[in-house]
Amino acid sequence: MRYPQILERPADRARVSAATNGHSRGIRERNRALLLRTLMEQAPLSRADLSRLTGLARPTVSEVVRDLLADGVIREGGPSQETRPGKPAVMLEFDRRAVQVISLDLSDPEHLVGALASPDGRLTHRLQRPRTPDAADGIVGLVAELRALADGPALGIGIGAPTGSSALLGLGPRLAELLDAPVHLFDDADLVADAAQRFGTVGTDFLLVRIGTRIGTAIRVVGDDGAPVERSIGARELAHVRAGGDPGDPCLCGREGCVHAWAAAPALARRLEEAGADRSAVLAAAGARLGTSLSVIAAAVDLPTILLSGPADIVTPDLVDATAAAVRAASHPSLGPAVAASTLDDAVLRGAATRVVAAEFSPR
Ligand SMILES: [Zn+2]
């Protein structure tokens, strides 16, 4: 199963980019999606801003804006604060009550985390619940709680989970029954990479490594102008690459020496909790295996930065330093990438919200 995908879409649900009749439908849908995406990334904006940023003619912008206002998707805010001659422009923004997304982060081995988010990735409510043996039950309960907090219908549900997560079995129909909204599924590493690029301060190409119940990777590339390249490389699981050296504990895949057995959150958290565990030494051993595996990827694709993301008690300076040392040891001295922790809070939740909005506002 490859992500992203739609886990469930209610059959009769009207899409936000509502269709119009006739041959102009395709163009109108595209214009509408273009304006919505531009607003999502940069609101508040005036009609003139939208025309300039999208290249669409002013009358076209005015027409699409009129439809969006009538649908209650956007609203007019206060006048522009800019001091320019003439009448101040009216600024447009999303009506946050009309466009809410339910985001779920299923990458933490111990907690289910969910939030209500606005289109720009801001979280308006955030809930955290312990994981129960039946993860699906817990997830459905969390979504019901979030729905009760929402001011209006949800645009969609965005779930960030490691590729192949068993918590998702049978979940789509249950969520669709609870909520008349499409359920989107994304790889958690992909979402953290999105968020790091959109909300973080990276500024270069990078390899993102998400340590959770699995170890996921995603690559993001920026263009010559510093803007994200549209088709960056999506998430892959690193897990069962052999790290070399002492094989360590057997892996769940039945082999020995996998990075997963050394550095994935459940096994690593268990070793950290063991009585008398030297936490620094445990994290250093995990970082050494992780760094050796990552150095090959970073060197092959010539990436200047490796970002590590995961539980705060795992992605510590001990782990980051050991990973960096192993990467350096395995790289050409002048070419080794820098290794850093990705410190963005709630990156999976924020990434999921912006992805759902982008998917729902894209013409198909
Ligand atoms: Zn394995």
Image: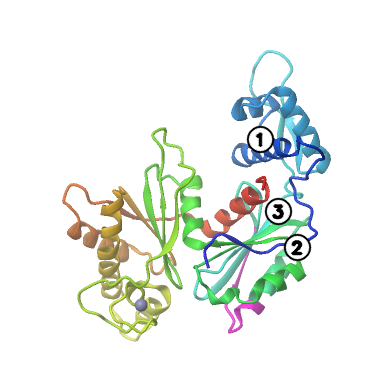
Q: Residue furthest top?
A: 85
Residue 67 magenta-highlighted = no
**Residue type beneath disc 2:** Pro
Residue at 41 percent across and 41 percent down: it is 222
Q: Position of residue 279 (x, y in %)?
A: 31, 75
Colouring mode (rainbow / by chain / secondary structure / one colour): rainbow
Residue 7, given in percent of the width and then of the height, sits at: 64, 66
Mark whose residue sits in front, 2 or 3? 2
Q: Which amino acid lies under the numbered mark 1 shown in the image of this protein?
A: Pro
Instruction: State which region is magenta.
Output: 125-137
C-alpha distance separating marks 3 and 1: 17 Å
Instruction: State the residue in front, 41 or 37.
Output: 37
Residue 53 location, quadrant: top right
Disc 1 crowd, CA 10 A, few/some/many (<14, 14-19, 20+): many
What's the distance in space between the residues labelled 2 and 3, CA to CA? Answer: 17 Å
Identify the mark at residue 10; answer none if there is no mark. 2
Q: Hey, what amino acid is under mark 3?
A: Gln
Report the Cα–Cα distance between label 2 and label 1: 31 Å
Q: Which residue is mark 1?
A: 44
Point 37% across, 43% down: residue: 204
Q: Earlier in the sequence, mark 3 or mark 1?
A: 1
Q: In the figure, is residue 198 to the left or right of 40?
A: left
Marks 2 and 1 close (CB-CB < 8 Å)? no
Q: Which mark is residue 100?
A: 3
Q: For the residue labelled by badge 3, is the local secondary structure a helix, a strand or a loop?
A: strand
Q: Earlier in the sequence, mark 2 or mark 3?
A: 2
